[in-house]
Image (cartoon, rainbow, N blue to C red):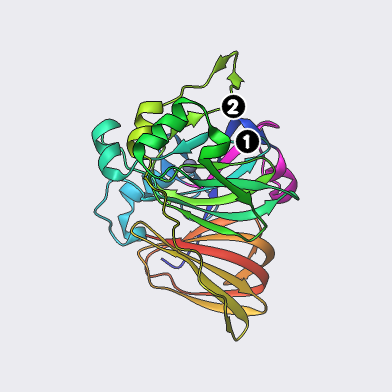
Amino acid sequence: MRELLFMEPCFKPMIWGGHKMREKYGYPIPCDETGEAWVVSGHQNGKSTVKGGSFDGWKLDELWSQHGELFGNPAEKDFPLLVKVIDANGDLSIQVHPDDAYAFAHENGSKGKTECWYILDCEEGADIIVGHHAQTKEELVQMIDEGKWDKLLNCFPIHKGDFFYIPSGTVHAIRRGTLILEIQQNSDVTYRLYDYGRLQNGKPRELHLDKSKDVIRCPHRNAATAGDWEKRDGYEMRRLAAGEYFTADQWKVKTALDLEQMQDFLIVDVTEGQGTVDGVAVRAGDHFIAPYQYGTLHVEGELEIITSYR
Ligand code: ZN
């Protein structure tokens, strides 16, 4: 189909959320503690909706199950990816996600979660947690039980434009002052190790210490980083990630880019600037899907986009 499927996000209030998405993208967020926008999602816990065009008002999961031709007639029951914008006005809990096998066995047949982060924006001095310093499971368990978080966790400074690949089993936390684009497997399974003793509606949020200890990889291994920028006529591009669950690329368009859509479907996130795609105006904060056999996307303007596919 020669029509782009623009997505309307589903918003999630969170105790650590903020209101940057309204200021930066003009999103109609429901409150000043909006932590997440599920911008491309067919997940039952928060579905995005098609905005305009032939499928105006359709939820992505309905489109996936009833119009498989838009996605290359997929065999899977559910849309396999989930894209979020995350506004961390406070620190997110220290957490880890299981892999497919563990989630299937312990979480009602759920998928595991491998994710990746692109830093859309962050405050001066912002940092992030990825990985830990324990050499063995025993050491890990002991440090968790004794609450030695500063010693255990690997925390380091971040900058706008940084990229991180977070395979399942990697302990991590997004921290305050950070706006992130997250591309992940279609899963909502999170094991929380530590939540800074915070309360939500007067009660601490649930922790999942035993499951966390089960799934955290020991010792931590650093994942692959983004590839180098390649200069082309009219644009630059780099590969962000090419893993088992998704491939993601970043494109800095200076004048124009012809992007061939050769996948079952291609998710496009506009992260900076503005321009047009096949004559349709787009700007930062827009997210859309180019369906199966769409053909070539002709992108014009000065803008940055991130594309992903399964
Ligand atoms: Zn996570």
User: What residue is shown at x 45% (from left), y 56% (from top)?
Assistant: 222
Specify whether 221 is left or right of 283.
left
Specify whether 148 is left or right of 111.
right
Q: Amino acid at mark 1?
A: Asp
Q: Which residue is mark 2?
A: 196
Instruction: Give the foreground label among 2 and 1.
Output: 2
Q: Are marks 2 and 1 in contact (CB under 8 Å)?
A: yes
Magenta span includes 22: yes
Q: Which quadrant holds the N terminus?
A: bottom left
Magenta span includes 84: no
Residue 263 image position (x, y, % from top left): 37, 68
Q: Which residue is mark 1?
A: 91
User: What residue is shown at x 28% (from left), y 38% (from top)?
Assistant: 102
Residue 309 image position (x, y, % from top left): 41, 61
Can residue 222 be seen from the camera position used here? yes
Q: Quadrant of residue 232?
A: bottom right
CA separation, marks 2 and 1? 9 Å
Residue 211 image position (x, y, % from top left): 35, 31
Q: Assess disc 1: are there few (<14), some (14-19) or many (≥20) residues with their C-alpha within 10 Å of its C-alpha.
A: some
* The residue stretch that appears in magenta: 19-40
Specify whether 259 is left or right of 236.
left
User: What residue is shown at x 40% (from left), y 40% (from top)?
Assistant: 97
